[in-house]
Amino acid sequence: MANYIHHVPGRLRVNIPVLKKDEVRVRQLRCYLEGMHGLLQAETSIVTGSVVIKYDPSLTSSAAILDSLRNLGYIRNVDVLNQPYAAHSLQKVADIFVTKLVETAVERSAVALVAALI
């Protein structure tokens, strides 16, 4: 089983198929990651089986995180896809755009709900 990894310093995305539809394993991994030194945030998806890990590169490394995941049996063979900084910047812009889009949709829904109640 190969795990696909996207990495830029400070952000690591790992595809872990055994997490798909396994809420117990997702919770276990999230608890483990929350206790790791240097990790800032870990987002897991039970639907896609992926985990996005944001970390402080001055405190830990992607290699240390991947070694931990390997030692726990979450990953085996690894294909690393290093994205250039331009791609990372594009991802940030896309993330901000999606966040703003969702915020706007929620605001409009809330206004519509209040208007309907009045």
Image (cartoon, rainbow, N blue to C red):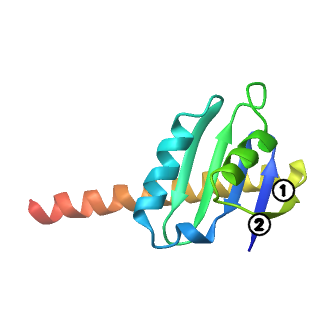
Quadrant of residue 61 in the image?
Answer: top right
Q: Amino acid at mark 2?
A: Tyr
Q: Nearer the viewer, residue 116 or 73?
A: 73
Residue depicted at x 71% and y 31%? 56
Residue depicted at x 54% and y 66%? 19
**Residue occupying the far top of the picture:** 58
Under circle 2, the secondary element is: strand
Disc 1/disc 2 C-alpha distance (Å): 17 Å
Q: Please state if 71 lies on the left or on the right of 113 as rendered.
A: right
Quadrant of residue 75 in the image?
Answer: bottom right
Q: Nearer the viewer, residue 54 or 60?
A: 60
Badge 2: residue crowd in 10 Å (few <14, some 14–19, many ≥20): some
**Residue occupying the far left of the picture:** 118
Quadrant location of the C terminus in the rendered image: bottom left
Front label number (1 vs 2): 2
Badge 1: residue crowd in 10 Å (few <14, some 14–19, many ≥20): few
**Does residue 64 lie above or below 106 as drawn?**
above
Q: Which residue is mark 1?
A: 87
**Does residue 9 lie above or below 22 as drawn?**
above
Q: Please state if 86 lies on the left or on the right of 108 as rendered.
A: right
Name which of mark 1 and mark 2 comes first in the sequence: 2
Q: Amino acid at mark 1?
A: Ala
Q: Position of residue 38 (x, y in %)?
A: 66, 29
Q: Position of residue 42 (x, y in %)?
A: 56, 46
> Residue 75, which numbered label?
none
Q: Which residue is mark 2?
A: 4
**Does residue 59 lie above or below 64 as drawn?**
above
Under circle 1, the secondary element is: helix
Q: Position of residue 16 (x, y in %)?
A: 64, 65
